[in-house]
Image (cartoon, rainbow, N blue to C red):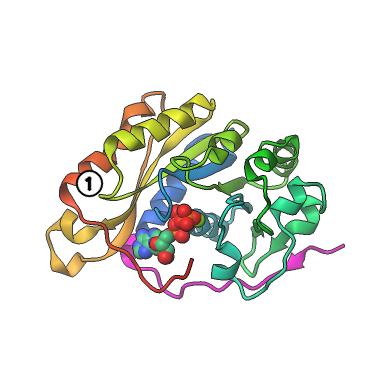
Amino acid sequence: MPMKKIELLLEEQQNYFMRESFNTLRTNILFSGKNVKTIIITSCMAHEGKTTVTFETARNLAESGKKVLLVDADLRKSVMVSRYTKVRGIAGLSQVLSGQVSINDAICKTQIEGFDIVFAGPYPPNPTELVGSPIFKEILDEKREQYDYILVDAAPLGLVIDAAVMASVCDGAILVLNAGSIKYRFAQSVKQQLQKSGCKILGAVLNQVNHKNMTGSDYYAQTGIRSEMIHDGAEADRAAAPARQQARSAAPTKKSGDSQ
Ligand SMILES: Nc1ncnc2c1ncn2[C@@H]1O[C@H](COP(=O)(O)OP(=O)(O)OP(=O)(O)O)[C@@H](O)[C@H]1O
Ligand SMILES: [Mg+2]
């Protein structure tokens, strides 16, 4: 059966900082090593920007010629399907992990060549159990042969354990930190939880940075992301450091009008 094809609703123009930041993030991922193919993205709290970062990074990688599978594994409150498409009732990960649907029936092709997505599917009553099922690992093992990268969007690890459960079978993890709103110690404890899962922490993405505060110029007053990807074993303290640094100097800026 041919794969389903869906039309993504894409933001027209990203600002300069967003574009540059996602280019940098892509480059950092490309330099993480050839064994880093399955990457989980999580955060401390809700609304820090995991889905935005995961989606735009997947899109950026695909537009640069990579074959990417985005797995929407926030089985608790994902809004990916309603935010990025007009389609409803697509089979998703919760049905795959509970054995109702095959993974190939849940993968959707998009209008962007090389960018495929598995949406979360209906909310299940047992999300942690499902993401910990052997089927999740089997999917990653099978699909890593067919894709250059698999990006997994997870629920916030500071609130629920699901991301650590999935991280234990991923090659790398990225922590998204909302600039200014996350306390250093909280970021440290979430980072340690990720480390306990045995997953390599690739780095942190500092999201919703107010560039006005970074440049001191009104002209550059934009929101954007800044990525801090660390490639060696010394990542531990540095991954959370941007939160501390930013908390001193920048106020978070938020886009409005996005229903959750
Ligand atoms: N860099 C940014 N600049 C402006 N707005 C942003 C940025 N990153 C995220 N947002 C907005 O912030 C809101 C939360 O982002 P997003 O849904 O990506 O976070 P999340 O961590 O996935 O949230 P959840 O925990 O609910 O899954 C959205 O309205 C999104 O459009
Ligand atoms: Mg999300």
**Image position of 37 (left or right of 25):** right
Question: Disc 1 marks which residue?
Answer: 246
**Image position of 1 (left or right of 176):** right
Residue drawn at (68%, 59%) of the image: 122
Q: Is residue 167 visible?
A: yes
Residue segment shown in magenta: 1-17
The residue tagged with tag 1: helix, strand or loop?
helix
The one of 95 and 8 positioned closer to us in this rendering: 95
Report which quarter residue 126 is drawn in: top right
Residue behind label 1 places its C-beta within 8 angstroms of ligand 1: no
Placement of 185 over or under 57, stated as above or below: above
Report which quarter residue 257 is drawn in: bottom left
Q: Position of residue 79 (x, y in %)?
A: 55, 63
Residue drawn at (73%, 57%) of the image: 107
Q: Position of residue 75 (x, y in %)?
A: 61, 51
- The answer to whether residue 7 is magenta is yes
Q: Position of residue 30 (x, y in %)?
A: 50, 43
Q: Position of residue 39 (x, y in %)?
A: 55, 41
Placement of 84 over or under 50, stated as above or below: below
